[in-house]
Image (spheres, rainbow, N blue to C red):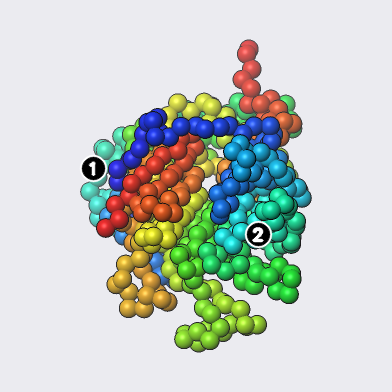
Amino acid sequence: MLVTTLCVFHFIRNMTLELRQETSKKIDKPELSKATTTGTGRPNSLKVVHGTSVCAMGSQMSIPDSENQKQDDELQSLAADVYDIIKDIQDPEKPNTLEELNVVFEEGIHMTRLHDMEDAYTVHIAFTPTVPHCSLATLIGLCIRVKLERSLPFKHKVDITITEGTHSTEESINKQINDKERIAAAMENPNLKELVEKCIKEEDY
Amino acid sequence: MQAVSHVYGNSWVCKTILTDSHNRTIRRVAWSPCGQFLASASFDATTCIWDRRSGEFECTATLEGHENEVKSVTWAPSGNFLATCSRDKSVWVWDVDQEDDDFQCAGVLTSHSEDVKNVRWHPEKEVLASCSYDNSLRLFHEDDDDWISFAKLEGHESTVWDFTFNKTGNRIASCSDDKSIKIWQEYLPGNDEGIATPEGVSKWKCVCTLSGHHHRAVYSIDWCHLTGMIATACGDDAVRIFLEDGTSLDQRNEPSFYPINIKHQAHREDVNCVSWNPTEAGLLASCGDDGSIKLWKVPTN
């Protein structure tokens, strides 16, 4: 079952992390690792949100399947809502939307519940840039973030990354597009701001 | 942890608003040790010095030189220096002559390979430290009239957002986008552990890493010099307090720290900064993306 596989992956990954730390102190009370919804179940989309684990392999299995399914359905439905918000963003270069160019796609969106909160989610978005050209990838990441900040109806945290393996400097770009200080400074540049506004503007048809 | 003091209560009143200086975000402000000057660091690449000795705040100096956003400004406890840092990867040290309101550039340090997020002075010595988007921290001192870097602290796996010295300055606690805290220990020349100190300067080593406590980037950290408590500000909206416990057999080289208090949803959004009151034990200030500043009373026993 997918849930069991995810849990084992967490367990092994956490053991490796623990071995690598110099001196780690992990004191949190045991937490259930939250399963993420995935369209395709790619391992690289999993984030170890709680480095602590207690992987709770046993406790994960104790959630009734129907409860898990209900959670998955809700998260899937929210992912679809998020996709609706970003799919029509204009590409900065071409006269097409990000959906038309397959820059964003529904499988690239993963929702997880925010720790301890109702109606609050972490939105993980992976996008594939059209060209391995640095400045456009960062610009697209910026447009996605700004559009989401303005349009998401629920409390959220957003992480945006480039689909693994689709860009030579993806680590560098991922770091830039998730650094909120850099983002705030960039958006104070009127030219950049104008460009972003143009791309995220909702056309009235 | 109880929230103390109402932001709207009559014990805190806005006395003045300083305008007409910066035309972009003001990222950091810092009081001088004597309390008569305020420095403001801005994304407009300048740092303003405000003098309030007349009773009113006047901008009496504007420090220029950085190529882009200034991220931080800090005064040396001695009153002799000021330091600034920027996305232009550099740290600037300024000589301070408070009599003449004169600030001269004493050194431009370009050791970091990426944005420098923060700078702070050692509490007792004229040593400056910085942390960066390049995942490292650096220490600087004056050697023969030249400011140079004498230590590089590596280990974090992503941007180091902030760091703090303990009371005597022989330890640093740093926090990072990698969601961890690291404690670094200073080893002086001639140390008992036999750790080499090339060129007669101290060596710094990471002696503890705290992971698994923060769910998102840790933006700020502050070490209370009265109680030893370490406070952190996190992108998961929480404020956490850590303290060293005395259980380790080797407290100097393998200390252990544990979380003694957590305030979830301290703010409705990311917490960006935490700062201990220097004279009142347990009094902590925090601020966040929700636009509020909060004062907390943290139990000290």
Q: Is residue B96 above or below residue B53?
A: below
- At 44% across and 54% down in the image, what residue appears? B278
Per the image, the residue denoted by label 1 is A64
Report in which chain the residue with disc 2 lies.
B
Q: Could you tell me residue B144's position as x and y percent? A: 73, 75
Q: Amino acid at mark 1?
A: Pro
Residue located farthest toward the front when viewing the structure as drawn: B54
Q: Is residue B297 above or below residue B76?
A: above
Report in which chain the residue with disc 1 lies.
A
Give the structural element (helix, strand or loop) at label 2.
strand
- At 41% across and 70% down in the image, what residue appears? A23
Res B149 label: none
Per the image, the residue denoted by label 2 is B81
Q: How far is mark 2 from mark 1, CA to CA?
A: 63 Å
Q: Could you tell me residue A109's position as x and y percent? A: 50, 38
Give the structural element (helix, strand or loop) at label 1.
loop
- At 59% across and 62% down in the image, what residue appears? B78
Q: Nearer the viewer, residue B222 or A177?
A: B222
Q: Is B174 on the left or on the right of B229, as rendered?
A: right
Locate the C terminus of chain B and report the quarter of the image it occupies. bottom left
Q: Could you tell me residue A9's position as x and y percent? A: 39, 57
Q: Amino acid at mark 2?
A: Phe
Q: Is residue A20 above or below residue B220?
A: below
Residue B142: quadrant of the picture: bottom right
Instruction: Give the crowd class for mark 1: few <14, some 14-19, many >=20 residues within 10 Å.
Output: few
